[in-house]
Image (spheres, rainbow, N blue to C red):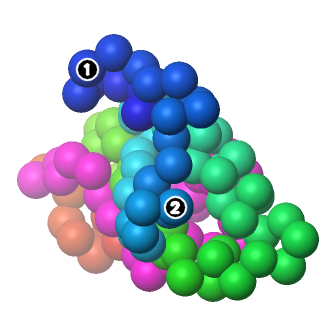
Amino acid sequence: MSAYYGPPKPEADMHAVTTGITLLDTSDVYGPHTNEVLVGRAVQQLGSGGSADREKVQVTTKGHRPKFQTLPGVRVAACEGSLRRLSVSCIEPLLYQHRIDTRVPNEVTVL
């Protein structure tokens, strides 16, 4: 919506959920952070007024910058930032590494 795949779209044109899309996948690198903020606004709108649509939508995001975010403490901070920008209490069904740093063992990358 805000980076890499053509020019940014106007918020008024972002209506994926009304077309039946139920998985909203983003990354902290898109924008950077802009896509997570936009998805967060959309999720908040779904949740307002007790809408059942919020329960139908899953939100996933990816952490980026492997040199910095593979260390557990930094990954936790990145995840907390994503939760705040997305306006959600959990990232469903998963949070995954956007780019893999092959120099860091998986046990260190994954919390």
User: Residue beneath label 2, please?
Assistant: 18
Q: Nearer the viewer, mark 2 or mark 1?
A: 2
State the quadrant of the C terminus: bottom left
Q: Residue at x 39, y 66 (%)?
A: 21
Query: Which comes before the other along the chain, label 2 or label 1?
Result: 1
Which residue ends up furthest to the left in the rendered image? 102
| Label 2, label 1: how far apart the Cα atoms are | 22 Å
Query: Taking the image as drawn, is residue 107 in sight?
Result: yes
Q: Is residue 105 magenta?
A: no
- Local secondary structure at mark 1: loop
Q: Which of 26 and 42 lies nearest the eye of the viewer?
A: 42
Q: Amino acid at mark 1?
A: Gly
CB contact under 8 Å: marks 2 and 1: no
Residue 39 picture location, percent across and down? 57, 49
Q: Residue at x 24, y 27 (%)?
A: 5
Q: Residues within 10 Å of mark 1 (few under 14, many from 20)?
A: few
Q: Amino acid at mark 2?
A: Thr
Q: Which of 22 and 64 lies nearest the eye of the viewer?
A: 22
Residue 58 picture location, percent across and down? 49, 74
Q: Residue at x 53, y 23 (%)?
A: 10
Residue 47 picture location, percent across and down? 77, 69
Read off the magenta span.
Answer: 73-102
Query: Taking the image as drawn, is residue 33 in sight?
Result: no
User: Residue beneath label 1, please?
Assistant: 6
Which residue ends up furthest to the top in the rendered image? 7
- Local secondary structure at mark 2: helix
State the quadrant of the N terminus: top left
Q: Residues within 10 Å of mark 2 (few under 14, many from 20)?
A: few
Residue 104 picture location, percent across and down? 21, 56
Q: Is residue 76 left or right of residue 22?
A: right
Q: Which of 45 and 4 lies nearest the eye of the viewer?
A: 45
